[in-house]
Image (cartoon, rainbow, N blue to C red):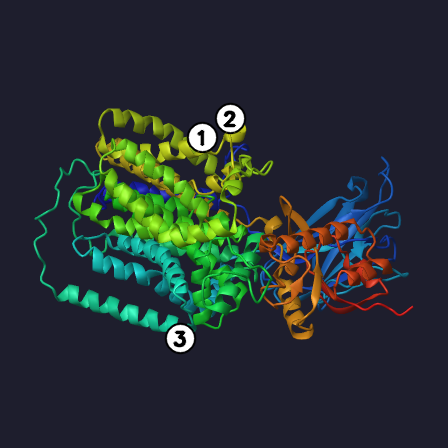
C-alpha cells in the first residue's frame, strides 16, 4: 500500500496509539489465559545463593542484620529462604519483620509476616519501592521477630559478599553472610545509559567489524554485478553475507599455502580493499548511464514474484529503508541490553570458541592443532566464525571474552539485514522484505536466543544462509543473467560449510526442493555450483577424512539427542506465528493452484521445512537417525524460512486489502497498527530478558578471579574446577573455571569441550571428574591428598559453583585460601607435613 494514502495511515497510527495506551494502562480486560505483553525487567544484582547454616532465630531483642552495597540502579527485590524446625500450629501467632535501611539509618521499606503462613525452605521475594539511584549505595537488611517467632533464614558460614557483612545482636553464630539475592528493575534511563556506555567502549569494535565483514562482499558485488541495479539495503545485506562467507575461505586458502595472518597484514588488506571500493564507486558514478534494455528479460508487472523482472534502479532512499534502519537499531539495542550484566559469554560453547580464537590468533592461521594451549593434534571442528574473531583480535587490543560477547550480539542484530536482502532478491518487494526483517529482529524468539548459548558459529551460519537461499532461487528461477553468478553461490556455499556444517546440511534440501519445483530446469547451474563448492572445500574434506571416521560419525546416534525441543516451541509467541503460518499455508497452496506466481516461494519454504522435519524424525518414525544433525539445531534455524514465508504471505494480504472498499481498508489499517505495535512492545521486552539464567555459567565476579589467577599462579599450575556431565561423555566447566585455559592460559582439570579430540586427555579428564563427583566431604584432608596425587596445584571456585563447596574447602587443613571475593575463591593445595 502506498505511503501517500495518508488518510488510511491515520487509522494505522490510531491503532498504534490505542495499543500503546492499552499497554501503558496495565493491559485492562486482558484475559487471564493470555500472558501479559509487558512485565517489569528484573535481573539479579547481588547473588549470594550458597547456604549451609541457619541464622539464629530473630525473636524479641535478637535482631539479624545483613549489609550490602547495590551494584545497579533500580533496587527492587530481596529474596530470602526461611528456616523453621516444625510445622506451623493453627493458633500460632508469631511475626517476622523485615526492614531495609539506608547507610544513614533511614527506613526505606518494612514488611511484617505472620509465621503461621511460612514454611521450611520457603523462598520469599520481598518487593520494595524502587530505588532509582541505588548503584553504589550501602543498605542494611534487618530481620526481627516477635518473642514467639519460630522462623529464621538460611545463611552461609564463609564470607561470600565482599561489600557487606552479617551480624546478630545477641549470641554467637557461624553465619558470615545470609543466603540472599537482590534484584534491580531496569528503567529507561538506565537502559539508555547502558547503551551509551557500550557505544563509547565498543563503538570502534562495531565499526571495525562492519568494515571487515562488508569488504569482500562490496568488492565482489561492485566487480561482478555492475549490470544490475539494487535496492540499497538489499545490496548491503548481500554484501554482508558474501563477505562473511568469503573471509573463512580466504583465511583457509592463505593458510594452505603457508601464509600467516598478522595484525598489520589484516589492516593493510582492509585499508587497501576499502580504497578499491571507493575507487570503484567513484568510477561508477562518473560513468555515463547506459541503456539496460539489451539482454534483459522483461515480464509483466502483474507478476511481482517472477525474478526475471528488470531490476530497476533503487539508489534513492525509500521509507522502508528508514524503517529497516530503525528496526536494526532497535534490534541491536535490545540485544546489547540482553547481555548488559555479563562480562563473559554464557554456556559451554563460548569457552571453546574463545579457545579456538586464541589459538588462531596465536598462530595466525586456521587450526591444525591446539598448541600452545592444549596437546591436541587435530581439529575436526568448523572454524569460519573464528577467522572473524581472530582477525579482530589481531587488529585491536580487545579483551577476548568481551570481543566475543559483543561481536556475537552484533552478528545477531545483522541477521535481519541478510533476511531483508534475501527476501527482496526473491520477491523484489521491499514491504515483503521489511516484514521478514522485523519479525526476526523483534518478536521472534530466534535468533535472539542464540545469545544464551554463546552459539556464535551457528549464528554466523544463519547470517549467511538467507542470501544463499536467495541465490539458489535465482539460479533456478531467476533471470538469465543471474545464472552467470553461480560462482557467487559457490562462495556462499563453501563459506557456509566452513562456518557451520549443520547449517550447510540444512541448506542442501532447499536446493533440491527448488529444483523439483522448477521441473529440473537450469539444473546444470545448480550442478556447477555443487561442483565448485565441492572443489573449494575439497582440501578440508580430505583433512576431515584423515582425522575422523566419517562413516562412524554419520551413523553415531547419541541416545536422547534428537528429541523435539518443545521448550523452544512454547517460548514467547513463536507457536502463534507457527499456527498463523499453518493457516496461511492453506491459502498459499490455493493461490498456487490458481497459478499465482507469488505463492511458489512460500510453498518452497514450507516444503523445505517439512522435508527437514521428516529427515530428522527418524527416532519418532522408526527410521535411521544420526547425531551429526538433530531436531534441536534444525528448529533454531527455522526462523529463516518462517520469516520469509510470513513476509511474503502477509504482504500479499496487505496488497489484497488495498483492493477492498475504503471502510474495510480503514479497519485493516487500524488492526495492522495495533498488531505491529503490540508485536514491537512485546518483542522489545522479550529480547531484553531473553537470556536463560541456567546457561550463565561464568558470572561477573569470576572475571576478577581469573585475572587474579593470571597474575599470581605459576605458568605450570593445574587448577581443579567444578564441572558437570554436559553431553554424552563430555564434561564441561560449571562456572568461570571453564575459561582458565583460554584466558589466563593455565591448565585445568576440565578444559573446554575440545579436549574430547584427544582420547588420552578425554580419558584422564573424565576419570578425574567421576572421582571428584564421588567425594562427599571436601573438608576431609584426604580429599586434598587425592587432588595432589592427580597433579592438582590449585582450586578455582566460581560464583555459580558446583560440587566443590568453598566452605568445606576452607575447613580443609591441606588447603590454603589465596583469594576470596564476591563468591569466587581460589585455594592452593598445600599438604601439611605429618
Q: Which residue is mark 2?
A: 621
Nearer-N-terminus badge (3/1) = 3
- Foreground residue, 634 or 160? 634
Residue 818 visible, this orientation: yes
Local secondary structure at mark 2: helix
Whole-angstrom CA distance, mark 2 to mark 3, is 55 Å
Residue 403 location in percent, x, y?
49, 64
The structure residue drawn at horizontal position 15% and vertical position 64%, both measured from the top left corner, is 285
Q: Which residue is mark 1?
A: 614
| Left or right of 441, for residue 562 | right
- Marks 3 & 1, CB-CB < 8 Å contact: no
Q: Quadrant of residue 610?
A: top left
Residue 194 visible, this orientation: no
Residue 668 location in percent, x, y?
31, 35
| Left or right of 24, for residue 303 | left
Q: Residues within 10 Å of mark 2 (few under 14, many from 20)?
A: few
Residue 16 location in percent, x, y?
37, 44
Q: Which residue is mark 3?
A: 264
- Foreground residue, 551 or 669? 551
Above or below: residue 689 compared with residue 631: below
Nearer-N-terminus badge (2/1) = 1
Amino acid at each position: 500500500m502506498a505511503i501517500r494514502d495518508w488518510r488510511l495511515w491515520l487509522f494505522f497510527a490510531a491503532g498504534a496509539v490505542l495499543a500503546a495506551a492499552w499497554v501503558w494502562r496495565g493491559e485492562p480486560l486482558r484475559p487471564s489465559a493470555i500472558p501479559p505483553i509487558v512485565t517489569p525487567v528484573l535481573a539479579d544484582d547481588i547473588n549470594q545463593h550458597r547456604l549451609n547454616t541457619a541464622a539464629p532465630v530473630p525473636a524479641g531483642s535478637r535482631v539479624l542484620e545483613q549489609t550490602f552495597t547495590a551494584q545497579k540502579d533500580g533496587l527492587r527485590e530481596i529474596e530470602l529462604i526461611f528456616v523453621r524446625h516444625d510445622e506451623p500450629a493453627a493458633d500460632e501467632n508469631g511475626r517476622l519483620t523485615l526492614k531495609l535501611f539506608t547507610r544513614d539509618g533511614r527506613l526505606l521499606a518494612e514488611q511484617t509476616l505472620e509465621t503461621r503462613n511460612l514454611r521450611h525452605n520457603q523462598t520469599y521475594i520481598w518487593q520494595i519501592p524502587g530505588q532509582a539511584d541505588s548503584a553504589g549505595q550501602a543498605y542494611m537488611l534487618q530481620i526481627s521477630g516477635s518473642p514467639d517467632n519460630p522462623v529464621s533464614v538460611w545463611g552461609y558460614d564463609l564470607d561470600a559478599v565482599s561489600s557487606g557483612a552479617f551480624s546478630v545482636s545477641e549470641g554467637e553464630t557461624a553465619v558470615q553472610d545470609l543466603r540472599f539475592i537482590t534484584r534491580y528493575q531496569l528503567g529507561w534511563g538506565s537502559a539508555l545509559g547502558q547503551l551509551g556506555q557500550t557505544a563509547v567502549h565498543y563503538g570502534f569494535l562495531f565499526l571495525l567489524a562492519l568494515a571487515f565483514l562488508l569488504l569482500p562482499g562490496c568488492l565482489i558485488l561492485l566487480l561482478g554485478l555492475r549490470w544490475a541495479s539494487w535496492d540499497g539495503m538489499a545490496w548491503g545485506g548481500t554484501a554482508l553475507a558474501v563477505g562473511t562467507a568469503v573471509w573463512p575461505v580466504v583465511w583457509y586458502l592463505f593458510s594452505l599455502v603457508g601464509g600467516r595472518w598478522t595484525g598489520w597484514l589484516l589492516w593493510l588488506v582492509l585499508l587497501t580493499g576499502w580504497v578499491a571500493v571507493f575507487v570503484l564507486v567513484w568510477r561508477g558514478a562518473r560513468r555515463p548511464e547506459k541503456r539496460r534494455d539489451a539482454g534483459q528479460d522483461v515480464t509483466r508487472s502483474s507478476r511481482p514474484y517472477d525474478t526475471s523482472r528488470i531490476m530497476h534502479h533503487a539508489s534513492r532512499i525509500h521509507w522502508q529503508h528508514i524503517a529497516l534502519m530503525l528496526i536494526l537499531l532497535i534490534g541491536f539495542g535490545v540485544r546489547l541490553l540482553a547481555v548488559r550484566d555479563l562480562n563473559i559469554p554464557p554456556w559451554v560453547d563460548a569457552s571453546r570458541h574463545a579457545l579456538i580464537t586464541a589459538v588462531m590468533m596465536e598462530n595466525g592461521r586456521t587450526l591444525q592443532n591446539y598448541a600452545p594451549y592444549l596437546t591436541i593434534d587435530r581439529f575436526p571442528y568448523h572454524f569460519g566464525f573464528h577467522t572473524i574473531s581472530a582477525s579482530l583480535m589481531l587488529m585491536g587490543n580487545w579483551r577476548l571474552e568481551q570481543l566475543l560477547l559483543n561481536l556475537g550480539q552484533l552478528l545477531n542484530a545483522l541477521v535481519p539485514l541478510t533476511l531483508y536482502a534475501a527476501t527482496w532478491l526473491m520477491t523484489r518487494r521491499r514491504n515483503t522484505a521489511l516484514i521478514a526483517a522485523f519479525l526476526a529482529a523483534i518478536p521472534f524468539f530466534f535468533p535472539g536466543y542464540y545469545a544464551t548459548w554463546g552459539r556464535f558459529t551457528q549464528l554466523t551460519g544463519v547470517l549467511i544462509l538467507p542470501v544463499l537461499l536467495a541465490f539458489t532461487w535465482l539460479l533456478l528461477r531467476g533471470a538469465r543473467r543471474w545464472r552467470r553468478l553461480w560462482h557467487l553461490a559457490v562462495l556462499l556455499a563453501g563459506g557456509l560449510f566452513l562456518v557451520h556444517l549443520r547449517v550447510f546440511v540444512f541448506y542442501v534440501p532447499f536446493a533440491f526442493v527448488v529444483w523439483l519445483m522448477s521441473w529440473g530446469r537450469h539444473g546444470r547451474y545448480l550442478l556447477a555450483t555443487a561442483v565448485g563448492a565441492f572443489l573449494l572445500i575439497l582440501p578440508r574434506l580430505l583433512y576431515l577424512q584423515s582425522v575422523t571416521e566419517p562413516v562412524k560419525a554419520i551413523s553415531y546416534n547419541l541416545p536422547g539427542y534428537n528429541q523435539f525441543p518443545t521448550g523452544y516451541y512454547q517460548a514467547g509467541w513463536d507457536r502463534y506465528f507457527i499456527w498463523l503460518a499453518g493457516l496461511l499455508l492453506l491459502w498459499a497452496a490455493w493461490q498456487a493452484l490458481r497459478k499465482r506466481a507469488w505463492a511458489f516461494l512460500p510453498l518452497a519454504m514450507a516444503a523445505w521445512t517439512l522435508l527437514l522435519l521428516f529427515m530428522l524424525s527418524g527416532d519418532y518414525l522408526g527410521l535411521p537417525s544420526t547425531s551429526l544433525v538433530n531436531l534441536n539445531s534444525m528448529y533454531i534455524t527455522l526462523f529463516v524460512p518462517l520469516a520469509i514465508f510470513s513476509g511474503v504471505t502477509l504482504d500479499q494480504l496487505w496488497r489484497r486489502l488495498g483492493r477492498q472498499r475504503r471502510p474495510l481498508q480503514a479497519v485493516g489499517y487500524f488492526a495492522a497498527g495495533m498488531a505491529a505495535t503490540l508485536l514491537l512492545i512485546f518483542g522489545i521486552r522479550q529480547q531484553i530478558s531473553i537470556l536463560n539464567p541456567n546457561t550463565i555459567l561464568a558470572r561477573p565476579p569470576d572475571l576478577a578471579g581469573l585475572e587474579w589467577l593470571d597474575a599470581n599462579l605459576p605458568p605450570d599450575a593445574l587448577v581443579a574446577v567444578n564441572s558437570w556431565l554436559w553431553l554424552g561423555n563430555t564434561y564441561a566447566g560449571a562456572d568461570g573455571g571453564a575459561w582458565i585455559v583460554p584466558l589466563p592460559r593455565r591448565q585445568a582439570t576440565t578444559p573446554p569441550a575440545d579436549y574430547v579430540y584427544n582420547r588420552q586427555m578425554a580419558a584422564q579428564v573424565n576419570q578425574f571428574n567421576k572421582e571428584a563427583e564421588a567425594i562427599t566431604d571436601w573438608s576431609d584432608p584426604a580429599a586434598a591428598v587425592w587432588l595432589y596425587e592427580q597433579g592438582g596445584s590449585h582450586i578455582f571456585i566460581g560464583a555459580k559453583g558446583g560440587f566443590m563447596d568453598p566452605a568445606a574447602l576452607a575447613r580443609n587443613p591441606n588447603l590454603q585460601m589465596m583469594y576470596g571475593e564476591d563468591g569466587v575463591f581460589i585455594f592452593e593445595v598445600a599438604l601439611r607435613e605429618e
